[in-house]
Image (spheres, rainbow, N blue to C red):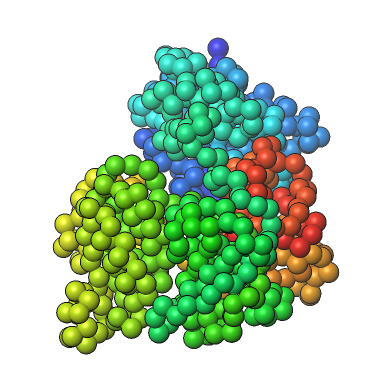
Amino acid sequence: MPSLLSVNVGMPKNVPWRGRTVFTGVWKYPVHGRVMVRRLNIDGDGQGDTAGHGGEQRAVLVYQVESYRHWKQHFGRDDLEHGQFGENLTVDGLPDDEVCIGDRYRIGEAEFEVTQPRVTCYRVGMRLGQPELPALLVSHHRPGFYMRVLREGHIQAGDEITKIGSGPGTLSVADTDALLYLPDRDPEKLRLAVGIPALSPGWLGSFRELLKDAEGSAAAAGGAAAAWDGFRALRVAAVTPESTTVSSIHLIAPDGSRLPPARAGQYLTLRVPGAGEPAPVRSYSLSSAPDSGRYRISVKHEPHGAVSAYLTTKLRPGMILDAAAPRGDFVLQEGTGPVLLVSAGIGLTPVLAMLHELAAAPSAREVWWIHGARNPREHALAAEARALLAKLPNSRGYVFYSSAEPGEYRRDQARPGRLAKDNVSALGVPADATAYVCGPASFMTDIEEALVAAGVDPGAVHSELFGALPSITPGLTGQSARQPHQPPDPPGTGPVVTFARSGVSTPFPDGRSSLLELAEACDVPVRWSCRTGVCHTCVTPLLSGAISYNSPPLEDPAEGHVLICCTRPDTDVVLDM
């Protein structure tokens, strides 16, 4: 009969780690006597990062004494105590390869249901002083598991554990963990997983995406393979002023051949040798029809932007720029329902490409074009957008000017005021629409809130963020937002690493072990969780160059992508971050 050996609790606290501070509840210690288990927690226990731990689906973490014995032998350690793996319940029995998602157990007065394996997280490795542990928990098939509380009650060490129900799918904890984190997934097991009601929503969503991928109806993370590797030379065919602040740059293949089609909404990453040393790298949305045989980007001349100034004032026809292939997953999706194309300022470029695609058919879908600009002098590509809308049988256009003369409003049939939440709400947009929103971050937040308030499904609202993606750094405290910069280390001697979205290029320092560590030193926004090549949170498009892994990841990322947490550059590299 399985039994409860120890009940372990601990409140979150600040812990120093690699010169930073982590707020974590992974430090758990045994308690004696009866303790109350409640719906969200055990009395005296807490979690520091509730996005990844705790809550109704992850109220109690279980780990087995058999796995303690395994790790004592693996690491040659005799100092492992109950609770040291961050678990609330140390048990004798309930192995990961036998316990199934949805199994139910009674312990003392309380009843529980198994919801998911442990989340791979760097903090368990921090707790044991074994940074590689998150990857080992997966590769050794010993993750442990979470349970939800079905009935509150008291428990204590020594209680017997009685199985009172079986999960519907007979998918073990170890198999579930491998299904998410390891390669060579069995589609039948994925179908089994998405049919288990007890599985936590986060894991359920991940398995649904993996099943779509396995069935060929969705691309792997990062989208379809790029049209070419690295950078290739493109010739400037024309530089065309579009407004007082925006110019369009038309790019063609040097040999006159047609360039590969892009998807409407994708962006082009350029290396611009004439704008600085080393050559700056910047990304710009394509504003042209997806299959025109050439590419067009429309660039706003920023007052202090060296690259935008070069592109809009010094670039001439016949000059050469280096470009990575079009990429990005902010793309127009197939469908028959209404489409909302919402933009502000230069944010119109990707949605204009979508408008080109819709007009080329022409699409019978209901198309709403909603755009905000300061005035007609700064409203780039306005005539082009109007001409495209005229080709669509079910289109409507709304333009807002925040600072224009009275006559200018009438001439362009524009509305006064800044395009914001209240204006969008007043338009009466259809609730069954799919929306594509592009502009400054605050604008997109306001518009997304307005659309959701109008009844649009949050999952149908897509946005394209200028600049780097927001960070994911679980548990770190006191992180102030700083502009990306050169690292504080002495100049490195390694290959040049370019963070394209952040505009930083720097030699790889001798003292850094990974591209993630270099990005952190430069205050480039980063995304990570396990830091050992398991969770793929840090997966990043590699625009050019070659890398090698410090330790092989458990599953290789999609082609053209790298896991920066365990990667070093072998040559000069350009990363889309």
Q: Which residue is drawn at 28% across and 67% down?
A: 386
Residue 437 position, x and y percent, is 36, 60
Count every numbered label the image shows and give the total.
0
Decide if residue 234 is on the left or right side of residue 287: right
Determine the residue positioned at 31% across, 50% down. 362
The residue sitting at the top extreme is 1
Quadrant holding the N terminus: top right
- Residue situated furthest front in the rendering: 256
Which one is in front, 400 or 537?
Answer: 400
Question: Which residue is nearer to you in this view: 310 or 574?
Answer: 310
Looking at the figure, which quarter contains the C terminus? bottom right
Image: 438 above or below 219? below
Between 144 and 189, the one nearer to me in the picture: 189
Query: How far from the left and from the top, in percent, is residue 60?
Result: 47, 34
Counting from the top left corner in percent of width and height, residue 557 is at: 64, 43
Q: Residue at x 38, y 67 (%)?
A: 348
* Rendered image quadrant of residue 309: bottom right
Quarter occupied by residue 489:
bottom right
- Residue 242: tell me if it is visible: yes
Q: Residue 356: give x, y in percent of width and height.
A: 38, 58
115 in relation to 271, above or below: above
Q: Is residue 5 visible?
A: no
Q: Which residue is drawn at 29% across and 81% down?
A: 375
